[in-house]
Amino acid sequence: MRKYLTVISLLIMSGYVFALAISWRIGEGYQIRFDGKYAHGSFQKMEGNIRFDPANPVAAQFDVFVDVASIDTGIELKNKHARSDKWFDAEQYPRIHFVSKAVSRTDTGFVVRGDLDLKGITREIAIPFAFRSEAGRHVFYGKFKVNRGDFGIGKTSGKDSDSTAVEVTVPVLSMD
């Protein structure tokens, strides 16, 4: 009986921790930029659910989707190629999905670890980020690299050039 009470207590406390995070709505002006050997540009459409309190990062949850067809390299032919089955295969895999597993504080901000699902392949990644609040404006900012070879995107060489740098700036509005 004691064992069951302990499990129930843990479940109740974990629900309480979840309730302490703030719900955020993704605001206007977000940017998802990428820069790799073969292409640079941005994705224009993103949506998701964010629960985060900088005072309690362990309670945070990120569940974010990016519309693959919204890729913009600045060159329409390159956009069409990126959407094709040789790269992102937007028809079969229309969304990039990231869902967090854990968030922790670092010396310079935070890091979120979670699963990135891209082109039907899921890999765990870590994304370092900062959360800034100034004059009622709240913004998430992060920079990280994604090895496109891990997701079967394009031809790979096994070198650093297989990685694409990603920079994300996401203004948010409190829903609480």
Image (cartoon, rainbow, N blue to C red):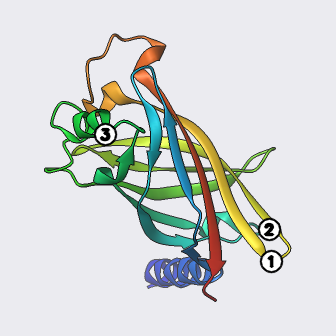
Mark 3 residue type? Glu
Q: How far apart are marks 2 and 3 (CA)?
A: 37 Å
Mark 2 residue element: strand
Residue 122 location, quadrant:
top left
Callout in the foreground (2, 3) = 3
Point out the image quarter for the N terminus: bottom left
Ranked by sequence position, the earlier of labels 2 and 3 is 3
| Relative vertical location of residue 138 with respect to residue 176 in this rendering, above or below | above
In the image, 113 versus 172, the foreground residue is: 172
Label 3 Cα crowd, 10 Å radius (few <14 / some 14-19 / many 20+): few
Q: Is residue 22 visible?
A: no
Task: Give the residue at x 64% y 66%.
Answer: 171
The label on residue 76 is 3
Q: Can residue 42 be seen in this view?
A: yes
The label on residue 133 is 2
Mark 1 residue type? Gly
Residue 64 location, quadrant:
bottom left
Residue farthest toward the right in the current orientation of the protein: 135
Mark 1 residue element: loop
- 119 with respect to 136 (left or right): left
Disc 1 designates what residue? 136
Image coordinates for residue 66, horizontal then vertical, percent: 38, 57
Q: Do the residues labelled 2 and 3 touch (CB within 8 Å)?
A: no
